[in-house]
Structure formats: C-alpha cells, structure tokens
C-alpha cells in the first residue's frame, strides 16, 4: 500500500539556507590560498587578549579557532574589515609572533611577511603558516638523560664472604688458603675488613700457619652529592701520569658510582628545527638510536651513542606532510673527558701502608697528603691536576685532555718534584684516535733529573721512559689486525723494547682463529709465537687448541670447557698439554648452587702433581636470621612476606626463588644505588590476607642489603549470613559496621550475606536497616585456609 505524503513546513529550512548563503558571501573574499608551511609550539589564549573587543580595528568581531604552523591555539578574537582579517599586536604576540619594529596595530594577517593564511568559513577557523624567523618558539629538548637519584633503603646487617682453597700434593704436602671479607652495614655506612689465612703442611715441618689482615675501611656515602668518605686503608687516587699509594688514613672525594644513572662524559647534541609537527629519527653509523616526535620550532636531541671514537650521524626530520629532511653530523665519543661543569676530585691524608699482604699493621711514620682533581672546562677540554706531599718531598703537576673534533683526543701533563733538595720533572703526552675500522694511539712519559713521588720513598722510582704505540685495523673478511710497540727504561736498568702483532678472525658463527707474535727488539732470540683455534660445540661447551713457541721451545694444548650456568648447575673442564717438559693435564668439576660454589680437580703437569678443592660463598645475618648464599660482591635484598612461606619471588620479571618457612628470601646480586624491581606472586598467598603491593623497588646502598616488604597482613575475614527475628534474610543494602572499627559500612547482599575482613576474636555488629537498627554478637574461629561462612545469625533490635 502506498504511503501518504506527510505535510512538511519548509519555511525554517528556507530561512536557514538564506542565513548560511549570506554568511558565505560575506566571508568568501577572506579565504586565501592554502600552504605547505611550518609548525610551532602551543600557547593558550582567551578572548580577553584583545580588551578592545574588535582587534583594534573597526569592523565585525570574529571568534576563530586558530592553528599556527600545525599547533592549535584555541579560540581567538579577530576583526573583519574590507574583506580582510585583522589582529591586534598583543594577540599576535601571544600566538608567538615576533613583529618588526614599526608594524601597524592592528595588522592584516595577509600582510605578515612570508606567512600564508587559510580561512575556513564553514568551520570558523583560520590556519596560519609562518616562517620560523617570524615566530618566537621555545626549544624542545628530546631524550634528555635523567639524573634522578633513587632513594637508598639500606637495612642493618652483617655479611661474611669466604673462599677456601685447599691442595693435597705428593710427598705428604698439603695447604689451605682462606680469604674472608667481613662486612657490617647500616644506613650510615659500611665497615669492611678483609684477611688472608694460610696453612701449609710438610712431613718434615708439620703445620705452618700464617694470618694477615689486608684492608679495614669504614665508608660513608652521600649519593645526592656524589661524595664518599673512607676511613682506614685506602688507595690514593691517581691520574694516567701519576701513581697511587696505599695509605692508612682518610679519603674524601667524588664517587660517580653513587649516581649510576648519571652520564659523566660529554653527550653529543643535535640541533634542528621543524616548521610543522614532525617525526625525528637519529641514526649513528647506520644504527637507529632514537625515534620520537617534535612540535614546530627549534629542538635539541641528546643521545648516548654506543660507539667509542669517530662516527657519523644522520638526523631525519619528517613533517606532517610527509616531507623528509636529512641532516648530517660528525661526532667523536670518548670516555677520557668529563661533561662541561662536572668535577671529579679526591683528597687523602694518612701514613703509607708498608709490606701489604706480609704484615697486618706495618705503617710509615711520616704523614702523607694527596689530592687529585679533574674538571670539565668544556665538552671538548677537561683539565686535571695532582699533588702529593710528605716529609721532605713535594710533587705537583697539571694537564688536560683536548678533543680535536674528528681528529681524536690529545692529552698532556707536566709535573715537578722537590725531594730534600733534589729536583726533577715529568712530561706526559698522549694521542688517541678511533674509527669504525681504523684506530691509532700513542703515548708516553719521561722523567728527568731526580723526579720522585711518595711511592718512590717506599719503593721504586717512576720509569725514566715509558712509551707505547698501537695501530689497529678491522678488515671484515680478513679479520682484525693490531700492531703494538712498548718501550720501558727504569732507573739503573737497561732499556727494553718490544714489538707485537696480533690477528683475529671469526670462522663461521661458532669458531675463531687468533695469532700473536712478540719480539724483543734488543734480542733477536727473544721471540714468542702463539696460534689458537676456538670452536663452540654448543651454547656452553667450547673446544680450543693452541700451539706456542717461546725462546725456541715448543708446546701444544687442547682444552675443552663446559661453562657453569649462571643460574646454577654443573660445569667442567679438561686440558692436555705437551712439550717443553710440561707434559700432562688438568681436570676440574664445578658446581654452582644457591648457597655457593664448589670446585674440585687434579693437576698433573711435569713433575708437579696435586689435587685441589675450592669452596666459596657467603653468610648473611639480617632480621635475626642467617642466610647462606653465593659470594656477594655488590648489594642484595632480603624479601619479607611477613611470615608466609612458599611465595614465589621475581627479580626483574625473572623467577629467583620462594620464601622460606619464615617468609624470607635473600635475593642476590643487586646493583647498588639502582632501582631493582622485585615482585611476588599474590596467587600463592592465603585468601585471608591483605597485601598493599605486589611490586617494589629495592635500592640498596654500597655493598649493603635492603629489606623489602610488601605489606602483607593476615586478616580475620568471613561471609556472615544475617537474618531478622522472623528468620528472614536482612534487606538488600542494609549497612553493617563492626563496632569500634572506623571506615565505610559494608552492604548486605542477596540472601542476607555480608563480607567483613576487619573482624576480631569477639565481635559486635551494628546494622542499619530500613526499619531501624539491630545488633549481632558472635565469636570468630578460624577453620582451614579459606574464607569461612558464619550464620545465619539473628540481628536483634537490642544489643545481645
């Protein structure tokens, strides 16, 4: 059946069309050609920017959505006059424009030099594309390296590292050597003491025992300032041209390890500008290093290049229209320099430690002072200085390292000394250049006169001449080649000069060949030659062979090694040797477990035959418990699940173990002063527990431990069925509070069931229903591991 036409009133449609046509005709003349132009940052504006209300010109007020170089600026008030759009100078300034002196106010948009505008009457918007020199846009900094200092959470405790090595030889001989490190730590610092105990036995002399203390040091660290204070046995700081000395005393200075996230070397910065919002990609030697987006305007991209030496960088900027611009840069990355404004210094005061390793408490009598300083004057120059003083001796010197652009790094230093009326000097020079394939370096020091430092008074003086040179080239298919030269001349000793050549070549994916030759340039007979081949049988087993010729004597070796898995397990190795009256071999079996490492083996080489065993590990005391672990050289954490055992723990999303019967697990190794993520599996927790978090950051201090808690608390929880005096379930939505407990009331659900997790052994419930208040009293009794159901319980209007 045909549908009957509906009666329509067309006069509203006609009126709307007339109004739209009139508006289009009024502003059609204002539209200009579109452009491909440029981009800028966003600045918020409002209509009050033009207090005059008309943009400073007589005409129609226009409220338009503004886009400047691809960035939305919001709704802005303009004025229309004589078919043009005008804006006041104050509005253009807030939009980011920098107007020439003498520019009329208001200004016609189409008269902005180099700018192109597009007016959209239907959307009541205007798009302005202006050259960057006409805009004052903030610089965008990309990929700025963070220098945040994590909050350290060191807990008190003690640790003992031990390594016991025992041998059993022929002719009734044996020995036991024990190295120990004892640490005590808390939030104030670390007290560390190392020692060496030796016991030897022969049938003729019996047991001979010896014990020596090595180092005892208290260390306090100040991560916010990158400073460390050490009291006890310390090694004075030194530069490439000076020598460190072991002293007993005080050391205070910079320790960059306290802020491991901070970059101390100069970082290359790449500058560019984008006319429109753009994507930025950085490639260094063809490898992508960064990808991100920038708004319009100038930008700076900072990155940590994964190269050491010279390289080339390409910065590809692709704007919103798909147009790509490539900028090329040359860079040179080196670890020899400090970033501009960064200082590295150390000062020591004490007395020299003598006969280290032979006598536990042998110290000199004359006080010694030492100071070392480095400072990044600029990103291309780092200054340095060093000075020492003791009774009758003063030594001081200064120098620096210069980055010569793409030409490498040049370093120089000069020092003078005065020792009881005898003077001398030292000159040090060095140069280093590294590229993708070729590298070259040379350097040396020369002492003249009676140059001396503190170490000279307690040992040998510095070499009169020490020089080295090295050239390397990577030829890909032919392998890598290196040639070196060393020259050393000590006081009252003849000079020694050696030349060396090395070659290394990968064979397939699992093999490699290496060849090395060393020649004494002062004795043609003093020559050594070594050729080796290494082949990986699988991911953990490696076979290697080699032949050696040294001073006219030949030898050969075959070695097979199965590496011990880092997560724990069994490893082994065996080797056979022949030649130079050293026929024989060695066999060893290793086991790495959760509580330490044990190795045992036999060695039969020439006339020497013995069996040996090595045991290493650590004992940790924290929170009233003792834990066994592998040797702990850095930091660690103790995870607590508040007495709940069997909870799986992960370190950086890697399973690390489960908590013991006391709800504790020692997690090692961790990196000191870094955020180490530790997590637990909440699915293994009992149902009647509450947990604050499942992930935490452990940030232990220097060689210390951090206690990590997850806020696990046992709760008394139950599902309670409440009924009224007629044994009917309480109404849905009734409110229930445990008397004496704060917090929001629980709501009664279907069938009068309410869930409560703040119960005590004896409980009184206050219930608010639509018909009034009632009360329930009951006792809680735990049964099993689940959530018990209690009731039905009668809710009475009077308190029971």
Image (cartoon, rainbow, N blue to C red):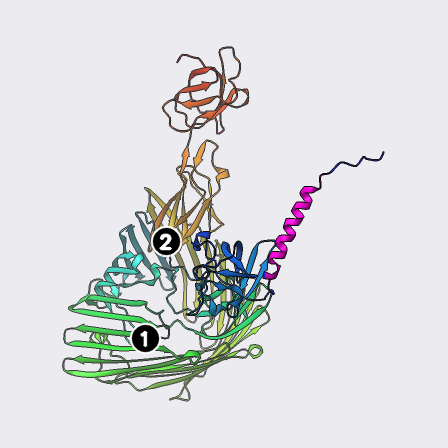
Helix, strand, or loop for circle 2?
loop
Mark earlier in primary sequence (1, 2): 2
Relative side of 738 to 507, left or right: left
Q: Nearer the viewer, residue 126 or 741?
A: 126
Q: Magenta includes 27?
A: yes
Mark drawn on residue 151? none
Quarter placement of the C terminus: top left
Relative side of 343 to 599, left or right: left
Does the magenta stretch mainly form a helix, a strand or a loop?
A: helix
Tell me which corner region of the image, top left, top right, bottom left or bottom right, holds residue 611: bottom left
Quarter placement of the N terminus: top right
In the displayed structure, 11 sits above or below 739; it is: below
Residues under numbered marks 1 and 2 in contact, where contact means CB atoms less than 8 Å apart: no
Give the residue number, with chain letter if any, for mark 2. Answer: 150
Q: What residue span does the magenta drawing correspond to?
A: 9-29
Relative side of 269 to 345, left or right: right
Relative side of 543 to 498, left or right: right
Q: Nearer the viewer, residue 143 or 244?
A: 143
Give the residue number, with chain letter if any, for mark 1. Answer: 240
Q: Nearer the viewer, residue 558 or 490?
A: 490
**Is residue 780 visible to us here?**
yes
In the displayed structure, 788 sits above or below 392; it is: above
Instruction: Estimate the x, y position of residue 795 in percent, counting from the top left.
Output: 46, 15
Number of residues whose C-alpha sits closer than 10 Å to that of mark 1, classed few (under 14), some (14–19) or many (20 or more): few
Cα distance between the residues tagged 1 and 2 = 32 Å
Which residue extends farthest right?
A: 1
Instruction: Estimate the x, y position of residue 676 in percent, counting from the top left.
Output: 42, 52
Q: Magenta includes 11?
A: yes
């Amino acid at each position: 059946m045909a549908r009957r036409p509906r009666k329509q009133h067309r006069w509203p449609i006609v009126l709307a069309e007339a109004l739209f046509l009139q508006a289009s005709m009024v502003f059609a003349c204002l539209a200009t050609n579109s452009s491909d132009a440029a981009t800028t940052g966003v600045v918020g504006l409002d209509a009050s920017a033009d207090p005059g209300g008309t943009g400073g010109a007589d005409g129609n007020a226009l409220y338009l959505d503004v886009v400047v170089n691809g960035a939305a600026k919001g709704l802005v008030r303009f004025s229309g006059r004589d078919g043009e759009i005008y804006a006041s100078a104050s509005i253009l300034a807030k939009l980011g424009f920098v107007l020439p002196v003498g520019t009329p106010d208001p200004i016609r948009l189409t008269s902005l030099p180099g700018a192109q505008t597009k007016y959209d009457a239907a959307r009541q918007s205007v798009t302005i594309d202006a050259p960057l020199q006409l805009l004052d846009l903030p610089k965008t900094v990309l990929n700025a390296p963070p220098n945040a200092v994590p909050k350290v959470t060191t807990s008190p405790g003690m640790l003992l590292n031990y390594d016991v090595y025992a041998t059993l030889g022929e002719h009734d001989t044996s020995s036991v050597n024990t190295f120990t490190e004892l640490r005590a730590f808390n939030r104030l610092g670390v007290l560390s003491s190392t020692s060496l105990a030796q016991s030897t036995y022969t049938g003729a002399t019996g047991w001979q025992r010896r014990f020596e203390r090595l180092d005892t040091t208290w260390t306090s660290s100040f991560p916010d300032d990158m400073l460390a204070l050490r009291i006890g046995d310390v090694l004075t700081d030194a530069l490439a041209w000076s020598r460190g000395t072991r002293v007993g005393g005080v050391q205070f200075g910079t320790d960059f390890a306290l802020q491991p996230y901070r970059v101390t070397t100069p970082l290359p910065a790449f500058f560019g500008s984008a006319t429109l919002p753009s994507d930025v990609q950085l490639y260094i030697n063809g490898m992508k290093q960064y990808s991100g987006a920038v708004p319009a305007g100038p930008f700076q991209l900072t990155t940590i290049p994964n190269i050491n030496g010279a390289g080339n960088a390409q910065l590809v900027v692709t704007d919103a229209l798909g147009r790509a611009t490539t900028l090329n840069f040359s860079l040179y990355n080196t670890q020899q320099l400090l970033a501009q404004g960064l200082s590295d210094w150390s000062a020591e005061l004490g007395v020299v430690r003598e006969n280290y390793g032979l006598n536990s408490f042998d110290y000199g009598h004359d006080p010694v002072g030492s100071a070392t300083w480095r400072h990044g004057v600029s990103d291309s120059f780092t200054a340095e200085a060093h000075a020492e003083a003791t009774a009758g001796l003063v030594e001081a010197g200064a120098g620096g390292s210069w980055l010569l652009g793409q030409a490498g790094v040049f370093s120089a230093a000069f020092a003078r000394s005065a020792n009881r009326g005898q003077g001398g000097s030292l000159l040090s020079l060095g140069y280093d250049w590294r590229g993708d394939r070729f590298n070259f370096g040379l350097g040396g020091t020369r002492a003249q006169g009676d140059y001396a430092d503190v170490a000279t008074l307690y040992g040998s003086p510095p070499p009169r001449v020490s020089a080295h040179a090295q050239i390397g080239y990577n030829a890909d298919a032919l392998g890598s080649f290196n040639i070196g030269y060393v020259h050393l001349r000590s006081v009252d000793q003849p000079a020694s000069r050696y030349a060396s050549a090395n070659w290394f070549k990968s064979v397939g994916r699992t093999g490699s060949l290496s060849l090395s030759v060393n020649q004494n340039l002062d004795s043609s007979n003093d020559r050594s030659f070594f050729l080796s081949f290494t082949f990986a049988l699988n991911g953990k087993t490696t076979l290697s062979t080699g032949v050696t010729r040294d001073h006219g004597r030949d030898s050969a070796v075959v070695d097979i090694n199965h590496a011990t898995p880092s997560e724990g397990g069994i490893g082994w190795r065996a080797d056979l040797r022949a030649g130079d009256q050293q026929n024989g071999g060695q066999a060893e079996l290793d086991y790495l477990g959760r509580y330490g490492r044990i190795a045992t083996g036999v060695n039969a080489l020439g006339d020497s035959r013995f069996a040996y065993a090595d045991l290493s590990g650590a004992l940790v005391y924290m929170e009233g418990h003792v834990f066994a672990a592998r040797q702990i050289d850095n930091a660690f954490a103790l995870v607590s699940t508040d007495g709940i055992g069997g909870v799986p723990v992960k370190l950086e999303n890697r399973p690390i173990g489960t908590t013991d019967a006391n709800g504790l697990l020692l997690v090692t190794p961790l990196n000191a002063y870094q955020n180490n993520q530790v997590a637990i599996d909440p699915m293994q927790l009992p149902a009647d527990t509450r947990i604050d978090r499942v992930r935490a950051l452990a940030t232990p201090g220097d060689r210390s431990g951090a206690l990590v808690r997850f806020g696990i608390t046992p709760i008394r929880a139950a599902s309670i069925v409440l009924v009224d005096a007629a044994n009917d379930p309480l109404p849905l939505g009734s409110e229930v509070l445990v008397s004496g407990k704060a917090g929001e009331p629980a709501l009664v659900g279907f069938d009068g069931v309410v869930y409560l997790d703040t119960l005590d052994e004896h409980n009184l419930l206050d219930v608010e229903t639509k018909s009034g208040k009632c009360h329930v009293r009951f006792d809680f009794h735990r049964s099993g591991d689940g959530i018990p159901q209690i009731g039905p319980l009668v809710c009475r209007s009077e308190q029971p």
